[in-house]
Amino acid sequence: MAQVFPKSSNTLSKASIVVAGLVVAALGLATININRTTYVNTQSMPIDQVVQFTHTHHVGSLGIDCRFCHFSVEESSFAGIPPSKTCMGCHSVVWKDAPILEPVRESYRNDTSVEWTRVHDLPEFVYFNHSIHVNKGVGCESCHGRVDKMPLMMRENSLNMEWCLACHRAPEKFLRPKDKVFTMGWDPVKELGVSQEELGLKLKEENHVQSRTNCATCHR
Amino acid sequence: MKLHHAVFLASAALFAAACRQDMHDQPKHKPFTGSVLFKDHRSARPLVAGTVARGQLMEDEHLWTGKIDGKPAETFPAALAAHFGGGADWQARMLARGHDRFQIQCTPCHGSVGDGNGMIVQRGMKRPPSYHIDRLQKAPPGYFFDVITNGFGAMFDQRDRIQVEDRWAIVAYLRALQLSQNAQYADLSAEQRDELDHPKPRTEGQSHSTEHGR
């Protein structure tokens, strides 16, 4: 009986082991990279909400301070989302009957919550704290971008581990004077005539800012 | 055969990658996370009626209500000194804090000099009275504290947003603002009069702005 497989199939089967390995590796790499794309992790995509709240109007043109609404950002790990009572302080008079605000009025009337969709959401195994960043002079803008130019809130940065670490390794690239933390569009060259490097190193020294890269800083 | 292996391994890899979200979204509650367990969908539960949290006993009537025996207090509560760090300059610290909080919480409506012409008023909010009208000039500190704490007419109360000591700090700043807008030559000390009559160039060290004296 003639052999089913010709001799050349030896080489072929050996090669196919290598190829199979490569295919697996390539697929693995592809999944990792697909997971990191802005499409999958929704970075830079405006998130639709029950109420089309705009930071452009409230922060950009009305000039309301972040802390008017996100009032626990200086003291707590959590920045805080304003209750509908905060909105109603103005909107019981301004745009009193606008249909766009009906969910807010309803929530205020019935003591229910407006269900906002989270835009930033770290995995549960990561510990994050707003207050230390704000009090050491990291501006909202460094992490959240130009909020005053966002009609709908979106995520400016990936919130990947490597993104956190890029700053933790060299915080001087981002530090600001503490009274400029809440300001949007602040530029050390224009405002103070010094480079970010020079200012950052000085502030790092003054405010005793550490470079924290130990795993236990964020995974505890 | 080999191809089957490859496909199997690849789908296993995909499957493992998809599992990633399990560790990312664990069944624990971060602040304000919704919950299906309770009727109101809130994971944060309201306090049971009658609960008193630490530091919330509110025994000090003067501090918490701005009243003494039911009448608006003419003075600031004694407890503030300790809160603002005591020492000789605690009042200066309180004023600085008050200025800061006033800018954040009050200027949108009342304007930065307190004339009632803030940005929101220009966009249709009811116009508040100026702080510099005679009636409010004469009102005691406890009255302002009460307006911030309980609201007044079209103005909502701000007690959830502003802690009690900060409310007093704002009142102190309001007083300073009222004085600044209505200062009389006679109110000044001899030294200040001298400075006004013979102005000298400002030196760097005199600036009261904190943090960075650049």
Image (cartoon, coloured by chain):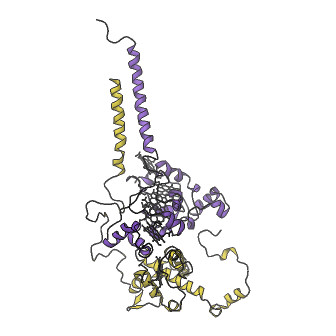
Q: Extreme bottom residue here? A: B186
Q: Quadrant of residue B28?
A: bottom left
Q: Position of residue A147 (x, y in %)?
A: 51, 60
- Work out whether residue B33 or residue A47 is closer to the camera in this orientation and state it: A47
Residue A40 sits above or below residue A9 on the image? below
Which quadrant of the structure image shows residue B201?
A: bottom right
Q: Residue at x 48, y 52 (%)?
A: A44
Image quadrant containing the N terminus of chain A = top left
Q: Position of residue B72 (x, y in %)?
A: 43, 90
**Which residue occupies the foreground of this view, A177 or B86?**
A177
Whether residue A3 is visible here, answered yes or no, is: yes
Taking the image as drawn, is residue B82 in sight?
no
Q: Residue shown at 57%/80% (left/top)?
A: B113
Image position, residue B79 (x, y; %): 44, 82
Q: Residue furthest top?
A: A1
In the rendered view, would you say A204 is above or below A30?
below
Q: Which chain is purple?
A: A
Measuring from the top left, give residue B17's x and y in whole percent: 37, 41
Residue beneath the point at 50% across and 59% down: A150
- Tell me what hue chain B is rendered in: yellow
